[in-house]
Amino acid sequence: MGAHPVALAFVLAVVSAFHGLFKWHDTPNPVPAWWNIHGHVIYFVPKWFGFTLLPVLIVVIPYILHIFAYYDSNLKKLTGEHKHAVAHLISLPALFLFVLHNFILLDAFVSQSGDINPRFLGINVALWFLIWAGYNFRQVPPNSSIGILTPWTVRSSDTWTRTHKHSAWVLEIIGLALLISAFFVPTGVPLLVVTLVLWLGSYLYLVIYSLIVFGRGETDREITGPLTEPLYP
């Protein structure tokens, strides 16, 4: 595993920090930190905390993911599309937080109301955790650190491969549906429900799908013998 996912995260964090410095003098203290489902601010935090939290997380979260991937023997010596897919997934939280910090939160910090547009949150989730994740899942090799990790995908390389190939088009289609819905569904409870159902529901579906695939594979093993070597003997 190369270090470039963390390097990208570091660059994004530095850009976010400098962007915050430009906004610092125009921002009151405290700054908004939590909003209701309509985007109206309901909780504030000290100015320094609001400006530093996400830039720090932009680096810390990918670094932790990179450490897990680095010590995963199944991710050693990756090349080509497999290496790029894993790197993209490691840096995915940084990209999500970068957009959240620079295009949503900083604008709320300097505005008089401190409100945000909930539609932007739905768009951000759709772009990264559904469309971008789905695009990269198809190329992720079997491992125990990065991907759709269930008791069944980590036990069978066949279950892993089939689940992740299936997840690619499922997440991309659902992500596109959420992206479109974010523009038209009324804000408040309707948009919150649609976002959670499409986002979390898609991953719950894939967990169930992996169980079904694994169960069918076990049945085939009893009839015809082993189909694939397990990921962990």
Image (cartoon, rainbow, N blue to C red):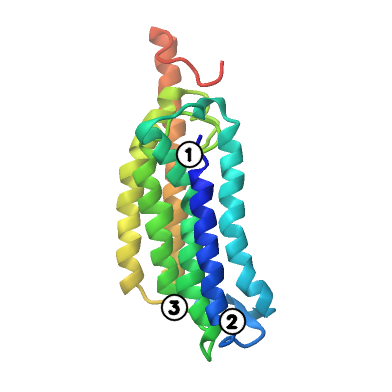
Q: Quadrant of residue 169?
A: top left
Label 1 environment density (alpha carbons within 10 Å; few <14, some 14–19, many ≥20) = many
Residue 87 in the image: x percent, y percent?
46, 42
Q: Is residue 39 visible?
A: no
* Mark 3 or mark 2, earlier in chain: 2
Give the structural element (helix, strand or loop) at label 3.
Answer: loop
Pair 3/2: label in front: 2
Callout 3–callout 1 Cβ contact below 8 Å = no
Which one is nearer the viewer's eye here, 168 or 199?
A: 168
The residue tagged 1 is 147
On the picture, is 226 further left or further right than 180? Answer: right
Residue 1 in the image: x percent, y percent?
51, 34
* Residue shown at the point (47%, 60%) measured from the top left: 96
Q: Is residue 169 visible?
A: yes
Residue 25 marker:
none
* Mark 2 or mark 1, earlier in chain: 2
Amino acid at circle 2: Trp
The residue tagged 2 is 24
* Residue shown at the point (44%, 29%) measured from the top left: 78
Q: Is residue 14 above or below residue 34?
A: above
Give the structural element (helix, strand or loop) at label 2.
Answer: helix
Residue 117 marker:
3
Residue 79 in the image: x percent, y percent?
40, 30
